[in-house]
Image (cartoon, helix red, strand yellow):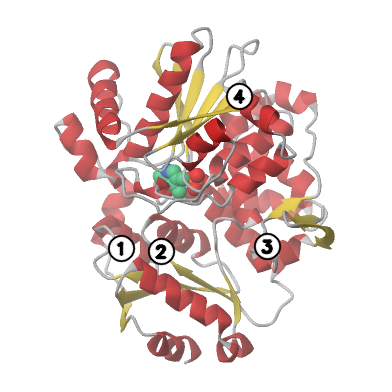
Amino acid sequence: MKYFSTKNKIVAYSLEEAVLMSLPPDNGLFMPEKIPQLRPEFIANLKNENVASIGYEISKTLLGDDIPHDVLKKICNEAFSFPVNVVNVHNNTYVCELFHGPTLAFKDFGARFMSRVMSYLNRKHTTPLTILVATSGDTGGAVADGFHNVEGIEVYILYPSGGVSELQEKQLTTYGNNIHAIEVKGTFDDCQKMVKQAFMDKDINDKLFLTSANSINVARWLPQQFYYFFAYKQWTDKNNPPVISVPSGNFGNICAGILAMQSGLPVQHFIAASNANDIVTEYLLSQKLIPKQAVATLSNAMDVGNPSNFVRIKEIFRHQFPALKSKLSSYSITDAETIATIKTVYEKENYVLDPHGAVGFLSLERYLQSHPRQKGIVLETAHPVKFPDAVESCIGKPIDIPVSVQTIMKKEKMSILIKADYGQLKEYLLQ
Ligand SMILES: *Cc1c(COP(=O)(O)O)cnc(C)c1O
């Protein structure tokens, strides 16, 4: 399989180039040259499959020319070693829990798969790969966990001192070995600026083989379709496929679901569940995608004012607006509605949603009100314990903390503290 930039259909890239570069030089996004068509028997016989075996079947079609099948199988088994639960919360509403991975958010799927794919693709290079990322919270933890002890890769994570939650900081700073946490006396924007400077610095690039673990990397995007198949496996009403509601920020997750549908997965309709950052909700009304300054909300992992993956969705629908609109709806949910949803769902159904899942839940409810014969699945993208302040005040009691989190909270923080000064970062990276 070759990969093309969304901005250029002429120059083909190998999987290795697409993954190790992350972004094509023209600033488009990489897309596979074609969308594989899965065998109908595969879809009909999902009942014996798990996320790892589904991942293996699908990754053979996308990555199988470049990575031997036994290696892909091992990558999938290692990366997807945690459960996914589908819970019936209400008559016509199911929640697919994607938060049982090590950092309690769905980003574990992409990060764990990408790290292993990168390690394999870099095996012939003698210099280790150096991953440099800035994080405002969630991405850093998933990247730290995903790359921990992965051979031939060193990871440097910059985060704003005092700008992440205690749990998030522990998830960045307690792995050790090849994971290096750099605490910056500054803001997330300072961190991001320093990372950008390093990518453009000749001295750094002469010495290190630098790459990013950006969420638009194909090796992070593509594995996000696997759990859609897993959720469908548990769908009993095969004559009436599910409506799927996806809490969306940068639109990577929902775009992977749409890819799954184009490969053969039965899906009635997709819902892009947004918070106050309503760029796509507006687009579906006006046909104009107008980036805005992001506004801060309770579902902060979706505070994105210019969703980078949306162009991939347009590409999948060949830029045909009516086709896109017939498969995608979007709602913009306020913080007040998010809180009310967490409360009601807890009181009526005894189920605890996190703020991102609540945005997804209410969006699905709105859609089902006008489509009463349909049923849906909400992707729950984070464990409620990641947002204790918002959630506990809604449900009026503390949330049970998973054992994995209890362990990490007891570990010792390891990080170096630097000023928001590029010179200090450079010195550290070059030493
Ligand atoms: C990153 C994230 C999202 C948004 O996912 P996209 O793929 O960027 O749309 C939603 N919920 C949580 C908890 C996240 O961490």
Q: Which residue is mark 2?
A: 135
Q: Nearer the viewer, residue 240 or 31?
A: 31
Three-letter amino acid code at the position of disc 3 = Val
Report x, y in % for residue 101.
Answer: 44, 46
Q: Of tags 2 and 1, which is closer to the observer?
A: 2
Q: Earlier in the sequence, mark 4 or mark 2?
A: 2
Query: Which residue is found at the position 32% from the left and 74% from the top?
Result: 183
Q: Earlier in the sequence, mark 2 or mark 1?
A: 2
> Is the CB–ligand 1 distance for label 1 below 8 Å?
no
Q: Identify residue for label 4.
A: 233
Residue that mark 1 sits on: 169
Front residue of 60 and 331 = 331
The tag earlier along the polypeptide, 3 or 1, is: 3
What's the distance in space between the residues labelled 4 and 2, CA to CA? 34 Å
- Residue type at numbered disc 2: Thr
Which label sits on residue 19?
A: 3
Instruction: Confirm whether residue 3 shows in the render.
Output: yes
Mark 3–mark 1 Cα distance, whole angstroms, equals: 27 Å
The mark closer to the camera, 1 or 4, is: 1
Q: Which mark is residue 160?
A: none
